Each structure stands twice: as C-alpha cells, then as structure tokens.
Amino acid sequence: MNNKLLSSSVISYVNEIIKKGILKKASDIHIKFDDLDGMEIKYRIDGILQEVEELFDVIDKKILERNVVEIISRIKILSEMNVAEKRKPQDGSFSFLLDEKRYDVRVAYMPTINGESIVLRILKSFLENTELKTLGFSNKSEEILEKMLERKYGMILVSGPTGSGKSTTLLSMIEKLNDGKRKIITVEDPVENKIKGIVQVQVNNEIGVTFSEVLKSCLRNDPDIIVVSEIRDEITAEIAVRAALTGHLVISTIHTNNAIATITRLVDMGIPKYLILDSMIGVVAQRLIGKKCDNYSNHLDEHSCNRCNNGYDGRIVINEILYLNEEVKNILKKNELGEKVKKEIKELETAKYIDFSMDVNEKIEKNLIFEKDAFEFS
C-alpha cells in the first residue's frame, strides 16, 4: 500500500517537512534550491546535518523538487517576509502546532548565486528535564554553579559558540531562581521559551527596542534578577556590569571560547578590568558533544541498536566553570590573562575551577562520550 502524501497542496508539504523536524528532534531545518545542484532538505540532528529518509517515504523526493520554490515561498509567507524579494536576506518567525504543543520557529532567508536558501530553527526545547545534571553538568560543576546562584548581586556569564546549548543552561538557571520571591526580567532576541512567573521582553531593533534601551528600562522596574540573552556590544556590556555592581544579579551569555577568554573579551569591549573583577561572580564555558548511547557498547554489531544514531544518543554538555573568589581575583588582577593564569588558578587550593580537560576526562571515564570526539579538549 502506498503511504505517500497524495495531496498536491504546498501547505501540506511544508507542514510535513516541519513535522518531521520536530519528531526527529532537529534543532534546524535547511532547505536549499540551486539551478545547478537542485534541491536539498537537511535536518540538524545532534549537531549533524543529514537527510531524513522518512520525509521522502511520505512525499516523493521528485515532488518536493518540483515544488521547492513554492515551498520556500510558503515558509516566507508564514514568517511574514516579502515573498517577491529574492535579492536580500530576510528574517522572520511563526508558530507551529503539533499534537496540541506549540513550537516557535525562527526563519532566516538567504538569496544565493543560483537560487535560494532558507533555514528554520525550532525553538521549542525537546528536553523534558532541563536540570543541570540532565544537561551533563558533573556533581562538582553543579555544586560550583549553585554556589554562584546563591549570590544576591553580581554577574554570571555563560560562554560558548552558537549552538553550544547556552540558552538551555540559562533556562535551567532561571528555573532554579524562579521561586516567586524575586522579580526576574529577561531581555531576549528572540524569546525562545515562555516561562511562567517572570517578565520577558522581546528586543526589536527596527523600532529602537535594543538590548541597551531595554536594559536601561529594566533598571527602573525594580528587578532582583536580570537575564540578558546575549552581550553583543560595548553598551550592553557596560550596562550589565553597572547593574551587577548596583545590587542586581545579572546573568547573560557571550561568544567566547573559555572562561578566561570571557574576561579578556569584556576588557576588549572597553570595560576596565577592575570593574569586571568587582562585578563578576563566575563564568561557565561550554560545548555540546555527542552522548554515547547507553545500549551501544552492549551490541556486537554497531548498527543493531535502533535507538541511537551511529552510537550517539543526543548530546551532552562539556563545560569549564570558574568561580571568582578573592584569591582568584587577585591572580587575575596582577597577571596578563592567558595560559599562565589558568595554570596558576588550577594550582590554587581554594579555587573552584574545572576546565574542559578535567570535565572531558571524567565523562570518558564514566563512558558518557567517545574519546575520539574529545581530543581537542584534552
């Protein structure tokens, strides 16, 4: 019996493409059309781009190829983009309902030399449990981070490249702090997860609702905790540091490679080093790495496990975490920031510091990750 989708509706094709992404727990859906290379539909699953054959089981690939231009146009309509504009990049978003659950989808359109490209980011977290331990934080890392969150004021930064799970870690921290006794305001672009009991503000640069403007307004709204989805520029960094120094707990993300580099980045943004060290509580640097399937090692045939993806079952956080106590601050004050400082902090008995290599080695010992995936952190 032929189970392929018989409807000729482009709407049904788009719905099926997104549905497959959600069911496969993809973070992104990439759709590309090129006069030379033809159509490409790939899903980013566990950080890896791949085709999903189940999509072509439902809709013949040739049908999708014939309709790919209309499919991209349909997504542009849903995202409230200009359908006729094929010369400039565009951004948009929409909501998608599946099994009575709402998924927010952020869309980025890009014209190419010979065609079009569109990427859909599915913002709904697929993790039922966002506790630090579930994300992959070790007991010691969790203990250090919880000590940071006990502080009434100061700044905590989560660093890492795009797609390293920073937003999920931020969400986990908010949920720990959201006890109803403190006012929490988040400044986001975009708002990725709706959280009950807190004030969430969406940045809109087109009408002047920038990170810096919203942050200034936040300070007049009597918050206890301010969460900024990302420190992108000098003005935002300066306001965040000032808020941390004036009695607020500020939590944010920043794009840097490790804990020490985070402080260097703020110095490069023009924030005086002494103000950074006075305001900073600690830094969490992180990456996502493929998690070893629990069943994988029990099978003689590596392809016999129907639960995992070539030995991987989702992804896990590996992290570096540094709590800035007075002894650590004194080392950072008197030295240039670099490997020498890192070594000196590691040798400090009172330091609460775990670097990537320590976290990776523990996860290899516990058989949570493959050693071949962790060589750059060891």
Image (cartoon, rainbow, N blue to C red):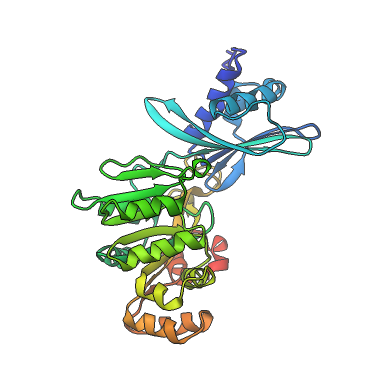
- Along the horizontal axis of the image, is 282 left or right of 115? left
Quadrant in the rendering for residue 281: bottom left
85 shown above or below 148: above
Residue at image location 51% in from the left, 79% down from the top: 337
277 shown above or below 7: below
- Horizontal and vertical percent for residue 273? 45, 77
- Horizontal and vertical percent for residue 66? 72, 21
- Horizontal and vertical percent for residue 270? 51, 70
Nearer to the camera, 354 or 244: 244
Q: Is residue 286 among the parts visible in the rendering?
A: no
Q: Identify the residue at the far left of this view.
A: 181
Nearer to the camera, 8 or 214: 214
Nearer to the camera, 207 or 73: 207
Q: Is residue 91 among the parts visible in the rendering?
A: yes
Residue at image location 43% in from the left, 26% down from the top: 97
Quadrant in the rendering for residue 35: top right
Q: How many marks?
A: 0
Task: For the N terminus, give its image quadrant.
Answer: top right
